[in-house]
Image (spheres, rainbow, N blue to C red):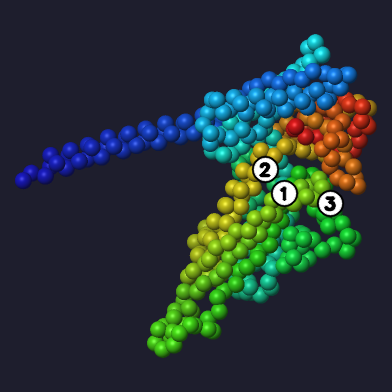
């Protein structure tokens, strides 16, 4: 029997199947890119009552978002997400406030934010001392938060500040509670955020990294001796890491999650191995820790990419407002941001709306704007807050 025709037929079939698979993969990739970049532009409006333009603007914005949600349900699948929003135009006509809002639609449950949010990361202390030996890498405490920050920055939605030499918790076993002699538990978070110009502060604790004891083996006889001998080569190690994200304006805890796993095999991480390196990831312990790093960065990225952008007012000169956000935060000329008053005693108050600022000048790390709409509230001052909505 001649196998050459059969072989030729098989190879041709395999070639065409692979070509179809490649074409389908390319089409799926293009479709996913199209889905991620889809946007919905909607208009909202509200009547201006007794000259309250700012109140009418807020109602018009809510109306535009409501219209975007309705349009989203009609146009795309129920799994789609109405992500970040941005005001692209606004005008007043016949005592009616009009807003045009652009909203990002994503089928991947991930927001494409119009602005970058600034986040500062701190060190992750270990809750129980002695669980990491002196012969192991000492990079875990700063390396874990550093790598989470790096992944967040790579998404294009965040600006990272590495402050891993600072630890927020004097008692890691009590985290996320902060023990402060001043009595103001969130003052450390707020101060750190102000020093770095950050909107969020990430912290964490290595809750567990204990190697299972080899002294006690259940059972007796030959099998127990085999198990005891094998534990010198194939051990078990618990792995538990808590990750927290605080609001840099008022110190509120916005995110708290515990990631757990079990390491089996060679559970030790040699000294000198850097978190994130290929050598680190090649070890059983490093592989599991890297997996948690990616899970945490994904969770934080999905939650805070859709979060409203905010920045602090630096100073006010005549009618010009200087605030701590610029080109690196993806601000552009003509952008409009909402200004809120901040009470130094009670922190950020949603109801203390001051007005709307129009961005007139954009530098690398700061911008200058002029107030377009002003309420009857107090004038803008340093320490107040500008937000995307």
Spatial distance from mark 1 to mark 2, Cα to Cα?
10 Å
- Residue 204, by quadrant, is bottom right
Q: Considering depth in this image, is 11 or 49 the residue closer to the camera?
A: 49
Q: Considering depth in this image, is 285 or 173 the residue closer to the camera?
A: 173
Foreground mark, 1 or 2, reads 1
Whole-percent x and y of residue 163? Answer: 74, 54
Q: Secondary structure at mark 1?
A: strand
Q: Which residue is mark 2?
A: 304
- Residue 2, by quadrant, is top left
For the point 68% across and 62% down, which residue is it?
A: 205
The circle drawn on residue 309 is none
In the image, taking residue 232 as reference, residue 66 lies left or right, namely right
Q: Which residue is mark 1?
A: 254
- Tell me which label, 1 or 2, sits earlier in the chain: 1
Residue that protrudes farthest toward the left in the picture: 1
- Tell me which label, 3 or 2, sits earlier in the chain: 3
Q: Is residue 311 above or below residue 243?
A: above
The circle drawn on residue 191 is 3
Spatial distance from mark 1 to mark 3, Cα to Cα?
17 Å
Residue that protrudes farthest toward the top in the picture: 94
Q: Is residue 270 above or below residue 195?
A: below
Tag 3: Cα neighbours inside 10 Å, few (<14), some, or many (≥20)?
some
For the point 53% across and 36% down, which residue is it?
A: 79
Q: Secondary structure at mark 2?
A: helix
Foreground mark, 3 or 2, reads 2
């Amino acid at each position: 029997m001649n196998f050459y025709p059969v072989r030729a037929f098989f190879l041709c079939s395999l070639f065409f199947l692979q070509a179809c698979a490649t074409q389908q993969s390319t089409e799926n990739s293009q479709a996913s890119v199209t889905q991620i970049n889809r946007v919905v532009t909607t208009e909202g409006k509200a009547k201006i009552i007794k000259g309250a333009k700012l109140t009418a603007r807020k109602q018009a914005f809510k109306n535009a978002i409501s219209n975007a949600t309705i349009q989203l349900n009609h146009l795309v699948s129920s799994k789609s997400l109405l992500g970040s929003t941005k005001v692209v135009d606004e005008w007043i006509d016949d005592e009616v406030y009009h807003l045009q809002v652009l909203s990002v639609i994503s089928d991947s449950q991930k927001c494409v934010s119009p602005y970058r949010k600034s986040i500062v990361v701190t060190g992750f202390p270990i809750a129980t001392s002695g669980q990491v030996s002196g012969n192991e890498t000492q990079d875990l405490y700063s390396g874990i938060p550093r790598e989470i920050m790096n992944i967040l920055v790579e998404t294009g939605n965040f600006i990272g500040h590495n402050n891993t030499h600072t630890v927020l918790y004097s008692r890691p076993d009590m985290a996320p509670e902060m023990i402060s002699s001043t009595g103001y538990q969130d003052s450390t978070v707020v101060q750190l955020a102000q020093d770095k110009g950050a909107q969020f502060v990430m912290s964490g604790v290595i809750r567990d990294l204990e190697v299972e004891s080899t002294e006690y083996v259940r059972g007796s006889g030959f099998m127990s001796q085999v198990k005891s001998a094998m534990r010198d080569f194939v051990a078990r190690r618990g792995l538990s890491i808590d990750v927290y994200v605080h609001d840099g304006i008022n110190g509120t805890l916005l995110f708290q999650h515990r990631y757990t796993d079990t390491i089996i095999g060679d559970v030790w991480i040699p000294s000198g191995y850097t978190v994130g390196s290929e050598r680190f990831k090649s070890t059983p312990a490093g592989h599991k820790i890297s997996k948690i790093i990616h899970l945490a960065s994904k969770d934080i990225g999905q939650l805070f990419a859709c979060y409203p952008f905010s920045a602090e007012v630096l100073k006010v000169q005549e009618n010009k407002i200087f605030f701590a956000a610029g080109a690196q935060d993806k601000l552009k000329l003509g952008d409009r941001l909402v200004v809120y008053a901040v009470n130094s005693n009670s922190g950020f108050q949603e109801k203390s709306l001051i007005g709307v600022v129009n961005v007139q000048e954009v530098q690398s790390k700061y911008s200058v704007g002029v107030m377009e709409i002003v309420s009857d509230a107090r004038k803008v001052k340093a320490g107040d807050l500008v937000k995307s909505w």
